[in-house]
Image: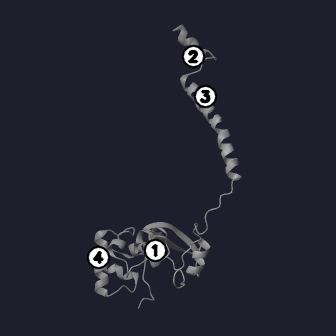
Amino acid sequence: MHLDWKKRNNPQFISDNQIRGIIALSMILAVIPFFYFFYLACSNFNYNLPKFSEQFADSISVEIVENEKTQGIYFISSGISSYQFFQEAGFETLPAEDFLLADGMRIVFKGEEREKEIIVSEMSAQHRIALGMRLDINKASREELIYVRGIGEATAKKIIELRERLGKFRDMEELTQIKGIKDKRVAGFRRYLYVDENDD
């Protein structure tokens, strides 16, 4: 009893919680110099990202594929031709004919040394949606529609059936003909889907 009283009233006594607090504080103080050194090192280190690797306003996205593996997605200014891009990016092979690059384009190099054949197609739906590009609802397959947020297998099937019945969609609002799809839901789909008005 007398010993307990001395512990509670002795100003030199340190509780377990206080010991843990001191240890934690010591660890924090020990780590601070490392963070400071890391901050100084980073602030003095200039890291240049490879050309065409950063997305910017009004940029278009082009996917390059070699030996059936995506080598990268490049972000370039609109109006750039294939010759300009390949030369600036350091590619040795040029297509037989020059052409303007378009958003969502997929360029495949076929052959051992990437020297013979260049095939131009379109990026997959997954890549397009991930990059913020919308899909043409009149061209999207059922599998592609499923990648759109809010569209499952059943809804994708109904969209395809309605498209076949109409011939093609002329306005996104036509989706409201499907039971369960209202204006609010159509508004959400507009972030991922569009109707190409120039497609006659």
- Amino acid type of disc 3? Ile
Q: Secondary structure at mark 3?
A: helix
Q: Which mark is residue 108?
A: 1
Q: CA distance from mark 1 to mark 2?
A: 78 Å
Residue 113 vertical placement versus 79 (above, below): above
Q: Secondary structure at mark 2?
A: helix
Disc 3 designates what residue?
22
Determine the residue positioned at 58% across, 25% down.
19
Q: Secondary structure at mark 4?
A: helix
Residue 54 is situated, as x and y percent measured from the top left of the image, at: 58, 66
Residue 191 is situated, as x and y percent measured from the top left of the image, at: 45, 73
Q: CA distance from mark 4 to mark 1?
A: 33 Å
Q: Is residue 58 visible?
A: no
For marks 4 and 3, the one nearer the N-term is: 3
Identify the image quadrant of residue 37: top right
- The label nearer to you, 1 versus 2, is 1
Q: Is residue 168 visible?
A: yes
Q: Secondary structure at mark 1?
A: strand
Residue 50 vertical placement versus 99 (above, below): above
- Amino acid type of disc 2? Arg
Residue 32 vertical placement versus 83 (above, below): above
Q: CA distance from mark 4 to mark 3?
A: 65 Å
Disc 4 designates what residue?
158
For marks 3 and 2, the one nearer the N-term is: 2
